[in-house]
């Protein structure tokens, strides 16, 4: 088992312990667990770094699934898996593809606007795995970097929220933005 894998397991176990420890008080305050899915557009400035490419596409569709625990009216702890899509670059040597996905663990600060709407800020870690393929070459890398973002939640019913958010993932010093919408189930 690699050091990177051990770091990820430790981070997941720590967040799991925090979620479990917070569940008692959260249930008593009428808050609690939730899970959701989202999809949206991912963009980066990766293509701007290279000269001589015949084509380069650094925009794609990203996906995520997440679960969390709303500890109180203003704080949630959240974990999820995020796929940031694919970058495709073509040059004289052929076409290269880069994909990145990983696990996100974050704290959300929530500000209710009224009974139906709230805004939130997010800050946490993104434990990512990247893979690059080109003719005759496959490379992989991983790391742990920060993620932050802003969002808006709309309570459609007691059990369902609509969620829109912008997130910035720092992947090995390369910023990837994700604009997404999704549905969240509240338990």
Image: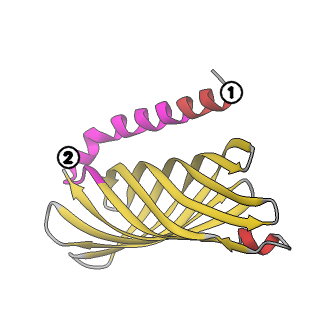
Query: Farthest top residue?
Result: 1
Q: Estimate the x, y position of residue 91 in percent, counting from the top left.
A: 78, 67
Which mark lies nearer to you, 2 or 1? Answer: 1
Query: Mark 2 highlights which residue?
Result: 28
Q: Height in image: 185 above or below 50?
A: above
Q: Are marks 2 and 1 in contact (CB under 8 Å)?
A: no
Quick check: 159 left or right of 55?
left
Q: Residues within 10 Å of mark 2 (few under 14, many from 20)?
A: few
Magenta span = 11-35
Q: Residue at x 66, y 32 (%)?
A: 4
Provide the major secondary structure of the magenta segment.
helix
Residue name at image x 67 percent, y 25 percent: 2
Q: Between marks 2 and 1, how big is the CA–CA gap?
A: 39 Å
Judging depth in this view, the residue of 41 and 164 nearest the camera is: 41
Callout 2 secondary element: helix
Q: Which residue is mark 1?
A: 3
What percent of the width, then of the height, locates residue 178?
52, 68
151 relative to 91 in the view: left or right: left
Could you tell me which residue is drawn at 70 percent across and 57 percent down?
96
Residue at (47% x, 63% y) in the render? 62
**Quarter location, residue 98:** bottom right
Q: Is residue 17 located in the magenta-colored stretch of the structure?
A: yes
**Colouring:** secondary structure
Q: How many marks?
A: 2
């Amino acid at each position: 088992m690699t050091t990177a894998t051990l770091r990820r397991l430790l981070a997941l176990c720590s967040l799991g312990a925090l979620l479990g420890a917070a569940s008692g008080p959260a249930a008593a305050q009428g808050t609690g667990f939730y899970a959701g899915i989202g999809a949206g557009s991912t963009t980066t400035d990766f293509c701007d770094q290279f000269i001589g490419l015949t084509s380069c596409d650094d925009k794609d569709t990203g996906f995520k699934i997440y679960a969390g625990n709303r500890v109180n009216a203003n704080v949630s702890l959240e974990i999820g898996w995020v796929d940031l899509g694919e970058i495709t670059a073509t040059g004289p040597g052929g076409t290269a593809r880069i994909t990145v996905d990983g696990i996100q663990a974050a704290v959300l600060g929530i500000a209710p606007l009224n009974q139906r709407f709230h805004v939130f800020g997010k800050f946490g870690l993104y434990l990512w795995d990247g893979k690059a393929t080109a003719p005759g070459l496959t490379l992989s890398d991983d790391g742990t970097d920060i993620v932050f973002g802003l969002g808006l939640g709309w309570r459609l019913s007691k059990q369902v929220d609509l969620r829109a958010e912008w997130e910035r993932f720092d992947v090995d010093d390369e910023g990837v933005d994700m604009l997404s919408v999704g549905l969240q189930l509240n338990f």
